[in-house]
Image (cartoon, rainbow, N blue to C red):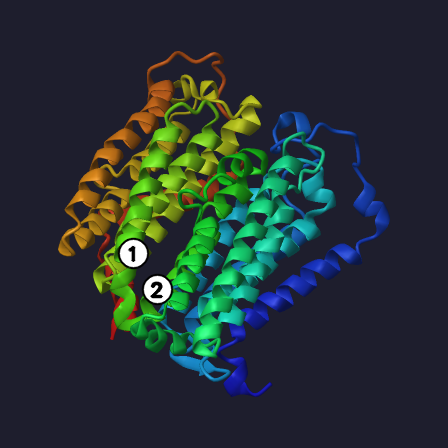
Amino acid sequence: MTPALAMPLVTELALFALAVVVLLMGALRPRAGRDAGRVPLGEGSGGPATRGPDGTGSPAAWLSLIGLAAIFALTFAVPEGASLFGGSFVLDGLALFAKRLFLASAALSVLASLTLRHENFRRRSAEYHFAVVVSVLGMSILASARELILLFVAFEVMSIPLFLLTGFLKRDPVAPEAALKFFLVGTASSAIIVYGMSFIYGVTGSTALSAIPAAMAEGHPLMTLGMALLLAGLGFKIAAFPFHMWAPDTYEAANTPFVAWLSVAPKAAGFVAIIRLYVEGTGSAALVWMPAIAVLAGMTMMTGNLMAIPQQNIKRMLAYSGIAHIGYMLVGLAALSSSGVAMMLFYLVAYMFGNMGAFFVVQVVAQSEQSEGMEAYRGLAQRSPLLALAMLVFLLSLGGIPFVAGFWAKLYVFWAAIERGMYGLVFLGAVLTVVALYYYLLVARRMYIEAPVRREPVPVPALLGVAILVCLVGVVGMGVYPSPWVTLAQRVASTLFS
């Protein structure tokens, strides 16, 4: 392992080392310590009825948080532009942008999970955080992959821990079912991806992405079939219509800090793979996929927004809302231009802060009220005005109201689509944005207009409050001053089209 090889791989090596240390902490912990506090419980999302002795996190959790934060800082010391293994692994602007997004979102999720008081998160903390770090490792490799086999292996390294984390609260009545559904859908998507890759390899005789443009230019039908199957498989990964069926059940069953991360990071990884394959990978033939991606975007926006309206569980509502946001991001991608990809990357960051912040508020209310139903938010503004204000800001950002991050995100992706003449898709997106405001404001009405059932304030754990504050600063900061984020996204996207 020479310095020339190690430096571009420093993020992956550091994540691997962190995963090993966290795993060893759990394996070497005395059995008496692992079994302490074991009591028969009805498992849930960490509310008061399922508490362990404390909510301050285990040593493994703190090590994971500190390690992820340190590796995030380390990415700024890594030189951009390296290429390893014959071009199979690259460290370009897109890879670094994605890795920082994965690490930041994972660190926020781990920070919020420190407040989970269920005894499973204390007794099996090392297992939980080992799975989180390994999944981030898979995402990090995926962001740099420019070769089909490496891309697939990275997807599996990312995905398998997610199945485990979904069913982590294994005594919960719904967690095993949700984990099984997630596993089956994920396995089917992986099979479709491999099937599509087999056609691409059969036509090109190579697994390198650099071999795809020439084959696409020849118009070979098996090449088109392979790329279409790949797009369908990646649609499962990002929960785009009609491959979204796993998301609502998974979001409802899993613990909320994990769901906050699940709603952002794996979706971002899927988008990075799509960019690699359908922007970089197809060259001048990329425009062939514009109609397919545009249709996928329109149907995803429509399905997510319309299905969110009748939901009475706020995590299911945010799940369908997330599906709709995937559709908005696909609008930017459908433009297949430097501006469109850049604004999609900007959207991912804005969505990370807004959506994760909303889920963290859900965790606070669920721990206090022992409920994830909409009724738990009645009169929240009278009981905890700052918490209600934070939730309102996050919902307004998700709804695209000026001047928070989500407003610029939607405006920019719509503008990129308009530049490509996609007026119908933009009109549909604008109408569905109004629909989205309806169900977001239903939550706001419960918080600010309806009378509370209880009068005492909702307690906010200090560490969870810090996570909410970080997301709030991100949403407001990007809304008030979006220019640096836009410039960064444009710089990353411009290298893909040069």
Left/right of residue 111 with respect to residue 442 in the rendered view: right
- Residue 464 against residue 206 in the figure, above or below: above
Q: Is residue 140 visible?
A: yes
Q: Nearer the viewer, residue 267 or 479?
A: 267
Which of the two marks, 2 or 1, is nearer to us in this view?
2
Task: Tell me residue 94's x, y (percent).
Answer: 37, 67
**Label 2 or label 1, whichever comes before in sequence order:** 2
Residue in the picture at 32% in, 57% down: 345
Left/right of residue 198 with respect to residue 64 in the rendered view: left
Residue in the picture at 59% in, 50% down: 162
Location of the C terminus (image quadrant): bottom left
Task: Tell me residue 264's x, y (percent).
Answer: 44, 49
Query: Which label is found at residue 278?
Result: 2
Tell me if label 2 and label 1 are in contact, CB under 8 Å: yes
Q: Which of 291 and 412 is in front in this view?
A: 291
Binning the other alpha carbons within 10 Å of mark 1 as few (below 14), some (14 to 19) or many (20 upward) gives: many
Q: Name the residue under label 1.
A: 333
Distance, label 2 to label 1, CA atoms, is 10 Å
Task: Tell me residue 255's x, y (percent).
Answer: 58, 38
Left/right of residue 350 with respect to residue 55 in the rendered view: left
Task: Tell me residue 163's x, y (percent).
Answer: 61, 48
Binning the other alpha carbons within 10 Å of mark 2 as few (below 14), some (14 to 19) or many (20 upward) gives: many
Q: Quadrant of residue 76?
A: bottom left
Residue in the picture at 58% in, 23% down: 370
